[in-house]
Amino acid sequence: MPSFDYRVRDSLGHEHRGSIDATNLDEAQERLRKNGQHVLEIAEDEEVTGLFAPRVSRADIIYVTTQLAVMVDTGISLATALDSITQQTENSTLRHALNDIRTTVEGGGDFSRALENYPKLFDKTYVSLIRASEATGTLAEMLDRIAAYLRKELENRQKVRAAMAYPMVMMVLTVGVTFFLLTFVMPKFAPIFQRQNTTLPMLTRWMMAISSCLIEHWFACLLSTALFVAGVVSGLRTDAGRRMCDWLKINIPIIGPMFRKVVISRSIRTLGTMVASGVSVLDAIQLSSDVSGNSFYESVWQSVLAKVTSGSQIHEALSMSPLFPSTLVQMIRAGEQTGKLDVVLGRVSSFYDSEVENAIKTTTSMIEPIMIAVMGVVVGGIGMSILLPIFSLSRGH
């Protein structure tokens, strides 16, 4: 159903803005007039779709969830809260989603079912927690818990991205400097070296050959690079490519331990939040598998799900995998035996949050000198290939 943005004046002379769903413009105007409002402006809100649709960030979802939690907690009905937030939302993609959700709720539909229509905005974890709150009547508390959960996820994601930004910048810088030296600096010296009758060092000959290839066959080099990148991207989209990438993430030196802790922290936090919110253990395990973001950990959680379904406990299934530390398994075992699994999982997730921060700091401190050394070797090697013949010529004269 189309949505129409309007500006109206009420009986007291106050102006209001908002949006209304109607089959056409005339119906929208008629509905506004029946409410005693004088229509000043009204126009169909043209939703931007496809590649040009505004992207909804995780921060936007956190903001909406936090606003809903506050408004519902103060006694405002869910439909009214959604209507108020919809009018304040500038992102057209999110505004249309919230408007549709509000319409469903006003018509008597479940909030969780309305959210399911927008899986890209509200994932399975979000919907499952809302569904659990509808069964227990704790929507305001659950929305606040979801906001805290999403906020922590976003913080960890940003920290990992910040840690990986430095090596990426250094890599781009290294490639740029190397390309400049080989295509602009080396060609200035190549004619001088070629006019000499002395045998050039092997390093210099290699660099001159690479320089010549980049200059004379630049189109072929560019095309080969593009095809290689396209091949890598296509390969990563396959199951085999994804598993290889996931294996490298958790096993590569220096970076691997950090990614392991990030995945474990994300899975355990989801499991703890689900169990504490009244979601069934089986559903909680399935969602922990979904959010892990690593195919190897997904396989472990699916194995745990199968074993728990057949009557085993979580710690018994996790103890069979080397991907989870024994101390973590022991803590989960204690929680299951004492009947305080939700409390233990909450403490474990907090512990791993701090572990993630320490791992990121450690990884960053180790990557920095390594990248500097790599850049020094590459740039220094090109520099030496230029200087070695010059030294030889100077000694000859």
Image: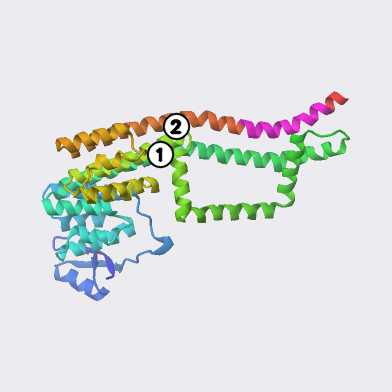
Tell me, yes or no, if residue 44 can be seen here. yes
Which residue is under mark 1?
Answer: 259
Q: Tell me which amino acid carries mark 2.
A: Thr
- Height in image: 64 above or below 268? below
Q: Is residue 322 magenta?
A: no
Q: Nearer the viewer, residue 333 or 19?
A: 333
In the structure shown, which secondary structural element does the residue marked by tag 1 occupy? helix
273 or 191, which is in the foreground? 273
Q: Secondary structure at mark 2?
A: helix
- Mark 1 vs 2, N-terminal side: 1
Residues packed near mark 2 inside 10 Å, few (<14), some (14 to 19) or many (20 plus): many
The residue labelled by disc 2 is: 363
| Mark 1 vs mark 2, CA separation in Å | 10 Å
> What residue is drawn where x is 29% and y is 41%?
318
Query: In terms of depth relative to the viewer, which is nearer, 179 or 385?
Result: 385
* Most frequent secondary structure within the magenta stretch: helix
